Image (cartoon, rainbow, N blue to C red):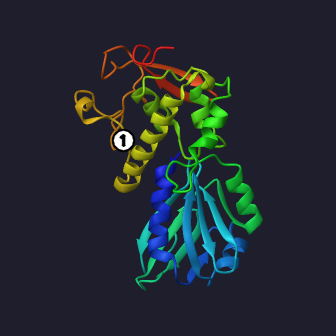
Amino acid sequence: MPEGHTLHRLAKQHHQRFAGGQVRVSSPQGRFADGAALIDGRVLTRAEAWGKHLLHHYDSGVSLHIHLGLYGKFSESSVPMDPPVGEVRMRLIGGGRSGEFHGTDLRGPTACEILQPPEVEALTARLGPDPLRRDADPERAWARISRSQRSIGALLMDQQVLAGVGNVYRAEILFRHNISPHRPGKSLTRTEWDAIWADLVELMKVGVRRGKMHVVRPEHDHGAASYAADRPRTYVYRRVGDPCRLCGTPVLHSVMDARNLFWCPTCQPS
């Protein structure tokens, strides 16, 4: 599932390409036909992301909400676009303020829906602070973490505690700060939390700028390759059984709340 930096990068791209101008919206697949009709021909005023959610706001007051889930993907295209191929949930074409037209097709999202303002407020109200948003308040997350008996590994993945962090950032940020994913949230010190938050902000900004994750510090980025082609080089994520980049201990794997968990038992003692 795409993590928060991917959605922020998409929001930035869509705002630059489409905001400020009328857009043409259709649903070649048909499943979003009614929603597409509500925004077709309207002016896209702003695109933004909150965690793993993408929002397009329109001059009519409604918003388009997209959650990519496991299989959702945008494919960008020049205009005129070729005929739709496959199950295209939504096609969007527009020129924005620049007048240079672009198109994008959306396939396979978990959510593609029109929301009224109260529904947008309800959505964002149930999400935790997003490290990539300027209005993020890390105190909200700390208030929940510092009182919780749940493991910090589970808390970091809870979008109501912290929005936008997925499995890769969870595994890597805990390794970078020598924190076992099994430690209860309330066992963390304020100093540890402040360091985690600051590191997430910086790492996720890098992800937005470069379009990919960079989580291994330069002095450790040697030897072991990434876990798969075109994937980030990591400390522990998807490296089960491989030697830790720092100490050589085999990386461990377990399942926590139905998600794969990776950590080094030496560098992250419980």
Q: Residue extending furthest right?
A: 118
Whether residue 130 is visible, yes or no, is: yes
**Above-or-below relation of 50 to 84:** above
Q: Nearer the viewer, residue 132 or 187?
A: 187
Q: Is residue 25 left or right of residue 77?
A: right
Residue 75, image x, y percentages: 46, 63
* Corner quadrant of residue 251: top left
Q: Residue at x 55, y 68 (%)?
A: 47
**Above-or-below relation of 93 to 87:** below
Q: Residue at x 66, y 74 (%)?
A: 36
- The residue indicated by pointer 1 is 231
Q: Nearer the viewer, residue 189 or 64?
A: 189
Residue 180, image x, y percentages: 50, 20
Q: Is residue 242 left or right of residue 146?
A: left
Q: Nearer the viewer, residue 72 or 214?
A: 214
Numbered-mark total: 1
**Above-or-below relation of 251 to 145:** above
Q: Residue at x 49, y 29 (%)?
A: 192
**Above-or-below relation of 4 to 186:** below
* Corner quadrant of residue 158: top right
Q: Dot 1: few (<14), some (14–19), or many (≥20) neighbours within 10 Å? A: few
Residue 68, image x, y percentages: 58, 54
Q: Is residue 5 left or right of residue 120?
A: left
Q: Give the SS element for disc 1.
A: loop
* Corner quadrant of residue 86: bottom right
User: What's under tag 1, amino acid-wise?
Assistant: Arg
Residue 30, image x, y percentages: 67, 69
